[in-house]
């Protein structure tokens, strides 16, 4: 477990700007410091929180934000099984707590530990707890920052929430095979956003259209696509 | 330090949906093996999802976010540093905002 915490320290620094962005965005939609800290603590999913904050209203549409969280976090459902060599040996709260703190970063770190033949399953929990603490703290700090700066709606500072995803897309780009699915997603999402203004359906519609097109194409070709 | 009951309900709903992915995925894949087609489709979910979130927002926002996105992509390609590229994107967006 301690090894997991130690390895997390440099990566935790990288999480700070992301947490600050979420905190500023939360302040922008009128959340209190307690609310954003609580949100980060129980949801613990940066991308999902940012997407939800992008469609937040008063009162929030419970179904919309839950669906957004579900769709954004679907990848976690695929990531868990990869850690089966560790998780299958855990029982009870250790298993379910380890899964609760599984995030992109410590998942990737754990995969390389498993591949290196290490067998300390506590690594996931240790690194996850470190990330969880940092996530809650940095988003709270972002809220404080937002309340000091008091940016107006439409202020360029709020672009940071979009910039996170733009930057992550650069990282996710796997080459030519992504071109068509991404174009389909962009076109469908933009079209649905026009047709149904004020709703969030465009995100789900674009993602489903793009993924199905890409998946069907790879399946027809007989390949299984590139594993993420 | 207020806690709006609707916001709290939304957090809980999001937490449940998120944990359904985290815990439920591991649990489900221990019971069944997904078909190759489903697996192929799912590999595209993260990328297309973020595209669908970002592109309409940029199209609606106009020049400011377009400049911001261009700045973010350029710095990300050059440095692969998330924090730097976010800062560059906000900077580019800010520059256009200040000029307008």
Image: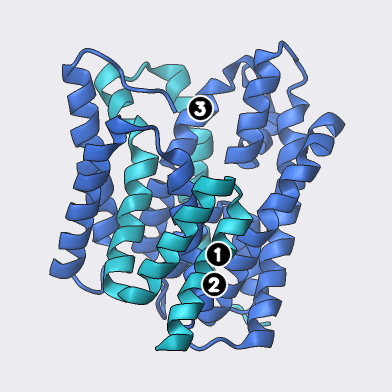
Chain colours: A blue, B cyan
- The local secondary structure at tag 3 comes to helix
| Mark 3 or 2, closer to the camera | 2
Residue under circle 2? B91
Please state which of residues A135 and B6 is positioned toward the viewer in this rendering.
A135
Q: Quadrant of residue A51?
A: bottom left
- Which chain is mark 2 on? B
* Residue neighbourhood size for the residue with mark 3, other residues' Cα within 10 Å, grouped as few (<14), some (14–19), many (≥20): many
Left or right: A174, with A91 as reference point: left
The image shows residue B81 at horizontal and vertical percentages of 61, 49
The image shows residue A122 at horizontal and vertical percentages of 77, 27
Rendered residue at 30%/25% (across/down): B40
Residue under circle 1? B88
Marks 3 & 1 on one chain: yes
Rendered residue at 26%/39% (across/down): A179
Left or right: A175, with A73 as reference point: left
The image shows residue A141 at horizontal and vertical percentages of 72, 70
The image shows residue A114 at horizontal and vertical percentages of 67, 17
Q: CA distance from mark 3 to mark 2?
A: 41 Å
């Amino acid at each position: 477990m301690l090894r997991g915490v130690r390895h997390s320290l440099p990566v935790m620094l990288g999480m700070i700007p992301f947490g600050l962005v979420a905190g500023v965005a939360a302040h922008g939609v009128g959340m209190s410091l307690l609310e954003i800290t609580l949100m980060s603590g129980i949801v613990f999913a940066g991308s999902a929180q940012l997407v939800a904050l992008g469609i937040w209203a008063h009162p929030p549409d419970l179904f919309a934000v839950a669906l957004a969280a579900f769709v954004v976090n679907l990848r976690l459902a695929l990531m868990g099984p990869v850690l089966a060599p560790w998780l299958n040996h855990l029982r009870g709260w250790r298993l379910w707590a380890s899964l609760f703190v599984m995030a992109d970063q410590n998942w990737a770190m754990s995969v390389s530990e498993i591949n290196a033949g290490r067998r300390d399953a506590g690594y996931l929990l240790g690194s996850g707890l470190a990330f969880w603490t940092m996530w809650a703290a940095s988003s709270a700090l972002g809220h404080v920052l937002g309340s000091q700066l008091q940016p107006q709606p439409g202020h360029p500072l709020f672009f940071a929430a979009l910039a996170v995803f733009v930057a992550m897309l650069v990282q996710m780009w796997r080459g030519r095979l992504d071109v068509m699915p991404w174009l389909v997603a962009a076109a469908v999402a933009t079209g649905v956003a026009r047709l149904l203004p004020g709703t969030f359906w465009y995100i789900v519609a674009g993602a489903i259209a793009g993924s199905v097109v890409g998946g069907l194409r790879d399946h027809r070709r007989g390949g299984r696509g590139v594993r993420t | 330090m207020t806690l709006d009951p609707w916001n709290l309900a939304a957090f809980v709903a999001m937490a449940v949906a998120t944990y359904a992915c985290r815990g439920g995925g591991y649990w489900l894949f221990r019971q069944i093996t997904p078909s190759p087609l489903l697996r192929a489709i799912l590999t595209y979910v993260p990328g297309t999802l973020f595209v669908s979130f970002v592109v309409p927002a940029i199209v609606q926002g106009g020049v400011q976010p377009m400049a911001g996105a261009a700045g973010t992509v350029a710095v990300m390609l050059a440095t692969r540093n998330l924090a730097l590229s976010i800062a560059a994107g906000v900077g580019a967006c800010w520059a256009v905002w200040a000029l307008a």
